[in-house]
Image: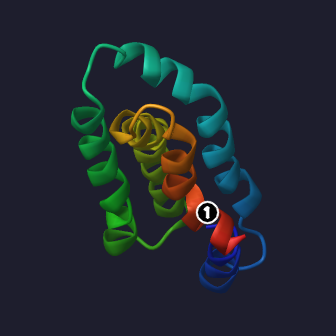
Amino acid sequence: MDLIMPKFCTRNFGDAVPFGNIQSINFWGCVFLPPLISSLTSGMDDVSVMLPGIWVMALSSFPLLFFNSPYAVAAWTALMTMGEVVWSPRSSSYAASLAPVGREGVFLMMCSWPTYLTK
């Protein structure tokens, strides 16, 4: 998102589009929403929390199919952020729950290796 969204906004809406403000939706959502979502879903199973979050994130680009405006980009970013803050913390918890006793670190490393590979 950090590489493609600024170019997409500039090419489609011109240089005056506030893509930094739109990107900040993701940043602020990822800062403030995970504790709230975690407290609301604390008694639920990891997979039952992750699946709706994955679906929300997967379907987040639908506003861009129907509307070509900066508001659609902001809606895409907001929906993607909501999906991310629901499933992402639980993926680490799920990976740790699958690990044998004493091997949790290896499982968590395998869960997050794609992130380290791309950066």
Instruction: Specify the amino acid type for callout 1.
Output: Thr
Residue shown at 46%/61% (left/top)?
72
**Residue 18 visible:** no
Under circle 1, the secondary element is: helix
Q: Is residue 102 left or right of residue 31?
A: left
Q: Residue furthest left?
A: 48
Residue 25's place in the image compared with 64, above or below, is above
Residue 113's place in the image compared with 94, above or below, is below
Q: Position of residue 16 (x, y in %)?
A: 77, 70
Q: Quadrant of residue 41?
A: top left
Q: Residue furthest bottom?
A: 11
In the image, 72 versus 55, the foreground residue is 55
Residue shown at 40%/70% (left/top)?
64
In the image, 3 versus 73, the foreground residue is 3
Q: Is residue 73 left or right of residue 11?
A: left
Q: Is residue 2 left or right of residue 87?
A: right
Q: Position of residue 20 (x, y in %)?
A: 76, 58
Q: Quadrant of residue 5?
A: bottom right
- The quadrant the C terminus occupies is bottom right
Mark 1 crowdedness (10 Å alpha carbons): few <14, some 14-19, many ≥20: few
Residue 24's place in the image compared with 96, above or below, is below
Residue shown at 50%/19% (left/top)?
36
**Residue 91 visible:** yes
- The quadrant the N terminus occupies is bottom right
Q: Which residue is mark 1?
A: 115
Q: Position of residue 110 (x, y in %)?
A: 51, 57
Residue 42's place in the image compared with 58, above or below, is above
